[in-house]
Amino acid sequence: MTKTVIPLHQVTIRFAGDSGDGMQLTGDRFTMDTASLGNDISTLPNFPAEIRAPQGTLPGVSSFQLHFADHHIQTPGDAPDVLVAMNPAALKANIKELQRGAMIIVDSDEFTTRNLSKVGYETNPLEDGSLDSFKLHPVALTSITVAALAELNVARKDAERSKNMFALGLLTWMYHRPTEATEKFLAAKFGKKPEVLAANMAAFKAGWNYGETTEDFAVSYEIAPAKMPPGTYRNMSGNVAMAYGLIAGSKRSNLKLFLGSYPITPASDILHELSKHKKFGVITFQAEDEIAAVGSALGASYGGALGVTTTSGPGLALKTEMIGLAVMLELPLIIIDVQRGGPSTGLPTKTEQADLLQAMFGRNGESPAVVIAPSTATDCFAIALDAVRIATTYRVPVFILSDGYIANGTEPWKIPNVDDLPDLRVEFAKTQENFMPYERDPITLARPWAIPGTKGMEHRIGGVEKADKTGEISYDPTNHDLMVRLRAAKVAGITVPDLEVDDPSNDAKVLVLGWGSTFGPIAAAIEALRENGQKVAQAHLRYINPFPKNLGEVLAKYDRVLVPEMNMGQLAMLLKSEFLKDITGYNKVRGLPFSTSELMEAIMVVLND
Amino acid sequence: MTDLVLTKKDFTSDQEVKWCPGCGDYSILSTVQGYLPELGVPRENVVFISGIGCSSRFPYYLETFGIHSVHGRAPTLATGLAISRPDLTVFVITGDGDSLSIGGNHLIHALRRNVNLKILLFNNRIYGLTKGQYSPTSEQGKITKSTPAGSLDTPFNPISLALGAEATFVARSIDSDRKHLTEMLRAASAHKGSALIEIYQNCPIFNDDAFQIVKDGETKSAAILQLVHGQPIKSATHGVIYKEGGLQVVPLDSVSESDLVIHNANTPDPTYAFALSRLSSSILEHVPVGVFRDVERAEYGGLVNDQVADAIKTQGAGDLSKLLAGTDTWVVK
């Protein structure tokens, strides 16, 4: 039979199953095969904090969402067009987010009375008509996979575990993705276990063939490549981009990279990634706790290394006192906080932006530090490089506020030319007479970075207040007041780029101002609104302390400023106190990135106000 | 070992020393300043890192590099520095509150990793800087400002704790015994890896004469069990023998000299040094002083740097362009 091929501009697919069903791997593979076709992509993994919650239950559902298109896209998509649900729990956990007409592919073998009752289905949704408004494809994924592997002599358990590859094969057929890369990937992954490799390969092909031959799937789809700037691309997550940015910063500054870290979700992948790159001279130190992690990084900085620590909210709370010491010692230190839902343990695997005020003010005394935030997954590379510039030039602690959304999400990254990266070389203080450890550079206000091993430069520093210039202990009231102001002036004077405003009509009355990972959803919403003829300006803050010099001017230009944040209004609070400007907040803390549609509505409310 | 000719004066900073008159810290400082020329390391390659407490003012008084850091956290800075700069000689200066209470975690982990740090633990069994509360080494029942009815906590024995944390070098000395403390500094410096020296230190203001029994000319010879490698363990009146699977202190006149334990600090089994550490109690009736344990184990910073060197040797130095390019790419024309 001849099958219809329908061209589409964009598709959002969500793979959902048990934590152990391999949904992240399935999604990753589909992403890679899609990227290689030249579509623009954006992904969002969403997994539970429990490593293996009881099988078939709602808390154990793990999902991976992928948005791909023939044009530039900003987000992993709102509502999925296609849901692949490996069991009733996966269906139940995700069905609310589907719009009418969406396609649902389920493993019908898993819809047993027992599994249905586990998640509170009284009747089988595949049979009771409740899914009539969707395009439902029940596929006996498990039994077909097992049957396809019958001749391979693999254990039934291993055969069943290959069903994610069957699903991948089916979707690969449906969207005309190439199969070679996945076959190569499987060969590399399971090369040492031939029977597992054979099972996965056979399941993958069986899924593809199932689409090709059965009448259940009469239509397949094509999505043309997106128009993107020429170059070589790879798929990149925020955490890996951050790790690469640090390595690049280390190379360009010619400083040894030292990471002190304690494992914490969702930051651990930066530690994992950096620990693989020892040949770059990178030292990764898994410390006994968060305090030791930042302490070791500061100790390494003191010795002339590029000291970095990575963590998430609760870990940052523990590092507080040591960061205060870094403020006092005026040494370079980079603190990467991959934010998650809080307070306390909060939502370890979900995203949030509620550590902004902790980074700004979470220390005793007047303790200014730099706060910057990447706007997308791939921006983590650039922001890490700039953190190296700021920390080493000004000898201050620099916070990078990433979050779970961009840390784990991926998008295409145009691979930069190394020669185009900034020159970040630094100079240590050289032997000199009458050395004064707190004598400042007149422009940057940075004090000398005088590392041990420099003859004649022996000196003592510490957390007790310093006398201006000499750095000796001083309890003098005037001196303390002066030093507090000097430390503040140094941070306030850091050179950061001006804020760029995207206002094509040049007469918008409303500015939407974001920071951090909300960039994609805000940009997508604004793009859609402009297509509908709305006039609205967008700007995005990558530098929060210090703010860009032109920020006040930008804010003054607009009648209304809307600040969407995944917190209760932390940036808005800073803006209001700094600029006495009325700010409208759009605040949600659901552990998920904003959807394009909710932001469109929120912006429309302000436009119509 | 070097042609450096430095003197005690070269290691003395221009800062006015501000401990209370009679504080044991003065004699420790003087001994360390006197010992450092012998170390043969240029001043710029020596770093003293302290936490918070009276003893942690120590680095200010030495003409070396130094950091007066955060309460309890000196080993964390020192670890990062020692790993990334194996060319430096790093000392940690700490007290009983700093290292055994707020910073207990860092002490045990530095010791188990065997980071190349020389840790001088000034034990005065009291919180001095905060004006006289009991510490984790104070004897149970201690009357202080925070324990008017007597402290309830069982104290730590720092030597036992260090041994339990897999320490490779553990010693004890006394602030006023310049000769002995110098010997301990010498042995600690010769040791590759972490070395902990517990120094009994008198606080004349809040816990005066806490160690009088091991300092007073009349009592010390009977109280101190000298640990000298290759020599029988004994004081003027008592000796140590093996008994019932452990060690016991007995009057010298009840045994013959040949029954006494010959001290071997290199004994691989830590239970020997642990048994030695248990011979002393809070009342200091019998106090082993000297090197309890000195065994070889790979030093942590060396291991870390070996892994890096090995990666460079086997894979070649990292190429940033290659790293960024990765393997799974596509080209947009």
Image (cartoon, coloured by chain):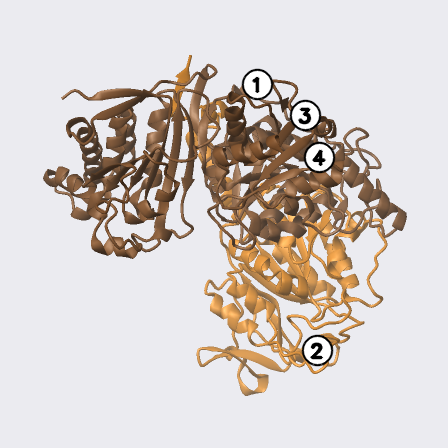
Chain colours: A brown, B orange
Residue identified by numbered label 2: B147
Quarter where residue A300 is shown: top right
Nearest the viewer among B27 and A243 is A243
Classify residue B252 by image quadrant.
bottom right
| Vertical relation: A453 (above or below) B128 | above
Disc 2 residue crowd, few under 14, some 14–19, many 20+, Cα 10 Å = few
Separation (CA) of disc 4 from disc 3: 10 Å
For label 4, the crowd category at 10 Å Cα-Cα, with few meaning under 14, some 14 to 19 and many 20 or more, is: some
Tag nearer the camera, 1 or 4:
4
Residue displayed at 55% across by 53% down: A289
Q: What residue type is labelled 1?
A: Asp
User: What's the residue type where badge 3 is placed?
Assistant: Pro
**Location of mark 4 (residue):** A546
Q: Earlier in the sequence, mark 1 or mark 4?
A: 1
Q: Which residue position is annotated with label 3?
A: A497
Q: Where is residue A271 in the image (x, y as percent from the top left)?
A: 49, 42
The residue that label 1 is drawn on is A420
Q: Which chain carries label 4?
A: A
The foreground one among A535 and B230 is A535
Q: Residue at x 57, y 18 (%)?
A: A420
Is label 1 in contact with label 4 (beta carbons under 8 Å)? no
Q: As shown in the figure, which amino acid type bears the numbered disc 4?
A: Pro
Q: Is mark 3 on a helix, strand or loop?
A: loop
Q: Do the residues labelled 2 and 1 touch (CB within 8 Å)?
A: no
- Relative horizontal placement of residue B244, taking residue A56 as reference (left or right): right
What percent of the width, then of the height, locates residue A116? Answer: 26, 53
Residue type at the position of mark 2: Thr
Q: Estimate the spatial distance between the alpha carbons at disc 3 and disc 1, rounded to whole Å.
A: 18 Å
Mark toward the start of the polypeptide (3 vs 1) = 1
